Image (spheres, rainbow, N blue to C red):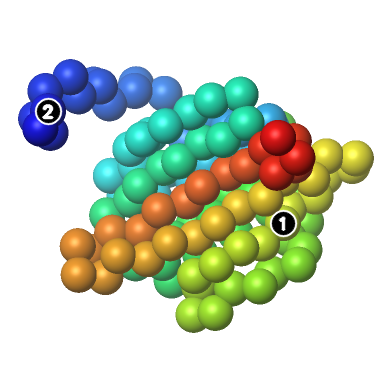
Amino acid sequence: LLMGHGRQQPCPMSSDDVEFFGLAVPSGNDRRELYKSQYRAIYTYKMSAQELDAAFREAVTADGAHGGWQINNDERVKYVGKLEVKKGDETLKVTFEDYPEAGMAALKYYTIQSFTK
């Protein structure tokens, strides 16, 4: 296993600079980008899903270039599961995952196109 090798250095960007199709990615506590492609992005955090929910809501609904999104179709139970965000004609899907035994939570961002492929 290559767990300790090839780790990316933390980005010097502020949270305002990290986005996915214009949707803000909350800085949260110890954010790590696990994966990013044309259709998906996965970030992990050292915080609970409840704490991540608060950071997410603040980041995506705030004023600013990557804020101003509306949360729709929230199917989550105890902060875990799927929701959609909409801004103008753009709709993105977001999944929250909670790993309480590790003290971590994850955010997965998807484009609608990723579901039709």
Q: Amino acid at mark 1?
A: Glu
Looking at the image, residue 4 sits to the left or right of residue 80; the answer is: left
Q: Earlier in the sequence, mark 1 or mark 2?
A: 2
Viewport quadrant of the N terminus = top left
Residue plotted at (28% across, 44% down): 30
Q: Which quadrant: the C terminus?
A: top right
- For label 2, the SS is loop
**Mark closer to the observer (1, 2):** 2
62 or 6: nearer the viewer: 6
The residue at the far bottom in this view is 78
| Residue sitting at x 40%, y 53% | 106
Residue, disc 2: 2
Image-quadrant location for residue 82: bottom right
Residue 54 position in % (x across, y down):
51, 64
Q: Residues within 10 Å of mark 1 (few under 14, many from 20)?
A: many
Residue drawn at (53%, 25%) of the image:
37
In this orientation, which residue lies closer to the viewer: 114 or 22? 114
Q: Are marks 1 and 2 in contact (CB under 8 Å)?
A: no
CA–CA distance between discs 1 and 2?
A: 34 Å
Q: Kindly identify which numbered label has been placed on residue 84.
A: 1
Rendered view: 58 above or below 64: below
Q: Amino acid at mark 2?
A: Leu
